[in-house]
Image: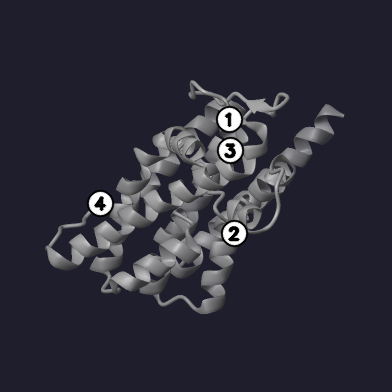
Amino acid sequence: MRHIFSAAFKYSFPVLLGYPVIGFAFGLIMSDAGYPIWLTAVMSVLMYTGAGQYIAVGLFAAGASLWEAALVQLVVGARHIAYGLSMINRMPFSGFRKVYCIFGLTDETFALLSSLPEANGEILNVPGLKNPIPAGSMGSFMFHVTLLNQSYWVIGSLVGATAGSLFPYNIEGVSFAMTALFIVLMLEQIKKIRKPFLFIVSAISAILCVVFLPSRFSLLAAIAFALAINSILGRKKVLNEN
């Protein structure tokens, strides 16, 4: 068990370099908004959505209704449905560990777990690890990677919330931490997919909705317009090719 935990820690180290910082920023934002430390802890343990948690603070401040908040979170977190479905067959175990691993599939955790090679015989050679792990310990390994990643986020958010409640901070620009992370992810996707027009259409839709619509409706409208326009353009392209 100690070998599995040590291997999971080494494999999750890249996430350790980023999650505490972004979690710390989330804790500062929660504290600045006047919310107690325990609520930060509850959100990081039970909600654990990264960007969704940042968005939730803004929704609270804007006075969004429960249905509006739920719809926004559903749209923003829809990608996690695909994460879970794509990983079900790659998790050769069941019970609580499998349920928790699906719950904890953040973007970064999914990137790590989906990069694991298929078991070859009785051992699994994991990239970045010198010693292979037994193929039968795959469930335990995935579980510990997921648990460690969430612990990095929880610890970072708690430290941020505590620091924000004890010391005065000028948090101007702190909320951009998650935005910056998603910009980096977007640039990586642009390079991988090589279809920048899709992202340009989405950006234009977002800008127009922010300018011409009330703030409480702009996000949902931007997502809806971007999906609709890209869907229409995609169908036209398919028809033209046929």
| Label 3 with label 2: CB-CB less than 8 Å | no
Farthest residue toward the right? 242
Residue labelled with disc 1: 133
Could you tell me how far apart the alpha carbons at marks 3 and 2 are, in whole angstroms?
23 Å
Q: Amino acid at mark 3?
A: Leu
Residue placed under numbered mark 4 in the picture? 173
Question: What residue did someone put label 2 on?
Answer: 75
**Residue 190, x across and y down, in percent:** 54, 31
Question: Which of pointers 3 and 1 indicates the residue nearer the eye?
Answer: 1
Q: CA distance from mark 4 to mark 1?
A: 43 Å
For label 1, the SS is strand
Determine the image quadrant of residue 124: top right
The three-letter code of the residue at mark 4 reads Gly
Q: Earlier in the sequence, mark 4 or mark 1?
A: 1
Tag nearer the camera, 4 or 3: 3
- 198 above or below 169? above
Classify 10 Å Cα crowding around label 4: few (below 14), some (14-19), many (20 and above): few
Which amino acid type is marked by label 1? Ile
- The tag earlier along the polypeptide, 3 or 2, is 2
Q: Which mark is residue 103?
A: none
Q: Examine the rendered structure and indicate whether residue 193 appears above or below residue 32.
A: above
Q: Residue 113: which numbered mark, if any?
A: 3
- Crowding at dot 3, Cα within 10 Å, few <14 / some 14-19 / many 20+, comes out as many
Q: Secondary structure at mark 2?
A: helix
Query: What residue is at 29 percent from the left and 54 percent from the top?
Result: 25
How are the colours assigned in the image? one colour
